[in-house]
Image (tube, grey):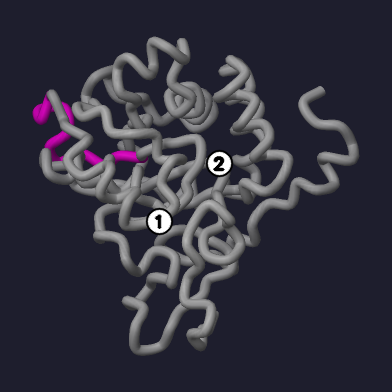
Amino acid sequence: MLLCEDCKAFLEPFDQERVCPHCGIEPWRSVPGETPPGRCVECGWLKRTFQTARSAFPYDSPAGQIVRNMKYHGAPWLAPRLVDLALPSLNRWFAELDEDTIIVPVPMFGWRELRRGFNQAAAVADAVSERTGFPVAERGVLIRNRRGKPQARFHSREDRMENLRGAFHVQRTDLVKGRKFLVVDDVMTTGATVTGAADGLLSAGAAQVSVFAPVRAMAGADNPLLDPVGSSAAVSK
């Protein structure tokens, strides 16, 4: 059993009717006159690369503990179970993706993957592929060509984005040009990582990029890892 009954009781998926249409965070908060149309205060600052992003659960939940166990306790076998928990609330969104969509896991820098022994995003991507039928791109299509520091070390959105500037590169543009992709990661926080990955694909000629991460770290005041988001600003859903 993956979760005890008490943990299951705390595993509430996001209400997909209330999420931001762009980044998928719940609740959708916007600042009239400041937030770009169809964006929220959490993603309005991001470069427009991916079309939509969706997650199923908040990081501050048993799903977040599953991710931590997977990443830091050498348990990639948890990825399929996490995906099985996440997909029911996102069936409609996945059904709306183009049937020719190709899955690309967010790549790790080489020695980091060797040290960990696996790429948790790739484990999630493989599970998504098995359950949706979307193929996973050939390994190495998108690479992380600059080491940078782990994103968890950065406490502001700007620093996270700067840490990833130019970090992703497409090796085989012939496998990317004109095609639609689903970038998959284990957790989405500010969106800096998936924005960088999507930017790398689009720069190589990809037609469109969407994003899936089963778990979402809540930004703003709900996430102690990040700077608060304009708490004094008037917001609307």
Q: Is residue 142 visible?
A: no
Front-most of 133 and 231?
A: 231
Magenta stretch contains residue 218: no
Front-most of 183 and 161?
A: 161
Residue 119: where, in percent of width, then height? 43, 21
Q: Quadrant of residue 223?
A: bottom right
- The local crowd at label 2, few if under 14, some if 14 to 19, many if 20 or more residues have their Cα within 10 Å, is many
Residue at x-position 35% and y-position 32%: 106
| Quadrant of the frame with the N terminus | top right
Residue 111: where, in percent of width, then height? 32, 14
Give the SS element for disc 2. loop
Label number found at residue 78:
none
Dot placed on the residue nearer the N-terminal end, 1 or 2: 1
Q: Which residue is mark 2?
A: 214
150 left or right, relative to 196: right
**On screen, residue 100 above or below 216:** above
**On screen, residue 172 above or below 231:** above
Give the SS element for disc 1. loop
Which range of residues does the magenta coloring cover? 172-182
106 left or right, relative to 179: right
